[in-house]
Amino acid sequence: MYARAVTWWVILRIALEERFVYRGDFFLGTLMRFLPIITQMFLWWAVFGALSGERNTVVGYTYANMVGYYLLTMISRAFSSMPGLASGISRQVRDGEVKKFLIQPVDMIGFLLLGRVAHKLAYYTVAILPFGLVFFLCRGYFYDLPAHAATHSWTTFAAYIATLVLGFLVGYFLEATIGLIGFWWLEVSSILFVYMLFSFFLSGHMFPIDMLPAPWGQMVEFLPLKYLAYFPAAVFLGKVPPGSLAMELWIEVAWLAFFIVASRILWHRGVQRYSGFGG
Amino acid sequence: MPVIEIKQLTKHYRVYQKHEGLWASLRGLFRREYKEVKAVQGIDLTVEQGEFVAFLGPNGAGKTTTLKLLSGVINPTSGTATVMGHVPWNRENAYRRRFALVMGQKNQLWWDLPAQESFRLHQQIYRIDPGSFDKRLSELTELLDIRDLLNQPVRELSLGERMKMELTAALLHSPEVLFLDEPTIGLDVVAQHNIQQFLKYYQQKRKITILLTSHYMKDVAALCKRVVIIAQGQIKHDGSLAGIVDKFSSHKVVTLQLREGESLDHFEQFGEVLEVVAPKVKLRIERAKVAQSLAAILAQHDIEDVVVEDPPLEEVIAGMFSQVGKPQVPVES
């Protein structure tokens, strides 16, 4: 067990070092993440500005709620987004780089997971200051939250942290599963495009999914995509009733288990099928 | 007990056949033609501990496929193989810790980091205790003369230096069996020579079992006593390098040194004239006729010296590849 922990630590440390090699790209990539939120704030400012008369909410959201929601999805996605994971796995299968995971006594899914943890840790180290600044400047958007929101309740805050960690894991195993389809299709960019498209709308990245009319809203609630952006924000904002919070978290854990098992099965079957493409 | 035992090992691939042109590409969206490639067809091979065996064969003969099967990268279509008692495609960690595969065209090191970091990672994943790790690393870096390069990012190393790093990484866990797939590909003569010397020394010292594929005859001649020729997925020859010449070369090269004033003409009647540089004549004569032709030459000409040689190895191998490539040649193993 100790030996395994040391191995994990060394993988994590080396992956972290690798992250810091290209400094310019790293800093720029980290800071540019804040740009989209500004365009979203302008868009909704225009939408709310166009509302007629007394009306100042859109499907239950005030302008402040909406900006607060977007700021929170930015954090959700800082945990759950996995740039280049699925395409990276399928590329490794296609050009034969995956061979090293078949030859060496190391598990690819675990190895890449540690790589992602390193990726995220490096990102947070740099991003924490600008994130802190943005939230401090935008603190006014979080004033009128209910009593069980994370700003008032430690239980909700703890649940919120749990949703971020689970969101990271769901995001990782979901994309790893898509990448492993590469054993059959070799090129997964189209399927990835479809996934990204659905994820953009149905994870809550584009708009809060509880805005969707029935029956679409309920259907989307049953999909795992919401854990990537909407769900952590909803927990923070107190949109999930305290009574059903534990149950909701267990459902997320079940989805995580589903994708862990799915990725394992695909890996196992894929390796059997693998014929060593790429010489 | 043999280290490697292969029985009737077979691997067939299904390869998508794409015809030229846009119309064919569109049709390929709905109906695809596949061709079955028989990469390895019923190979039998036994390798004893401490042997250094070369796999020779034309491109696409099945050499690399055999190495991939033995290292557990791919599953066979049929047949069996064991390496040190393990079935490679079961991919047990116990087996993975006992062998290594080095591919000349593939990089296993972290591209952006110094090789030292990749070695540290190997130490962990192969569970090498710190004492042995330090000892082996200093031994290997000394032998390969790469001590000063350990802290340079791998991407900034030359091809030869990178191959030395790859070999170091592969040998850190002291594998008992080493598979080398074209380890000197693309290297200059000096780098090739260095790698050969290192492999020779290391193999003799550690008595490990090595299977090597290479296109460079010099690698094979320098390193391996035993040569296995594979063509069309089958073993066509298994024996010594000298044995190849005996088996596959039908001619001898005879160099005659003539006494001054002797005519250099009329040697065509004894064999193919390869070169005439006075006072020497080089002939290619059929093996069976060498004695008879020499007697005739000595009777008709005033000869100072005679040298009878086998043709150059490269030439024999090239001739043999074209010969074994033909289906009518009986399969020997």
Image: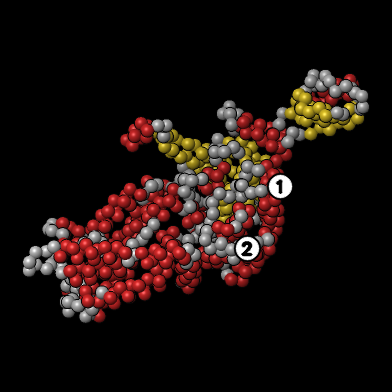
Residue A256 visible in the snapshot: no
Nearer to the camera, B224 or A211? A211
The colour scheme of the drawn protein is: secondary structure
The circle drawn on residue A152 is: none
Q: Residues within 10 Å of mark 2 (few under 14, many from 20)?
A: some
> Image quadrant of residue B228?
top right
Give the distance between the C-alpha atoms of the residues marked 2 and 1, in whole angstroms. Answer: 27 Å
Callout 2: residue from which chain?
B
From this viewpoint, is residue B202 visible? yes
Q: Nearer the viewer, mark 2 or mark 1?
A: 2
Which residue type does callout 1 highlight? Ala
User: Can you identify the residue that label 2 sits on?
Assistant: B149
In percent of width and height, residue A233 lies at 24, 69
Which residue is rendered at x = 65% and y = 68% of the image?
B135
- The chain ID associated with circle 1 is B
Q: Nearer the viewer, residue B241 or A96?
A: A96
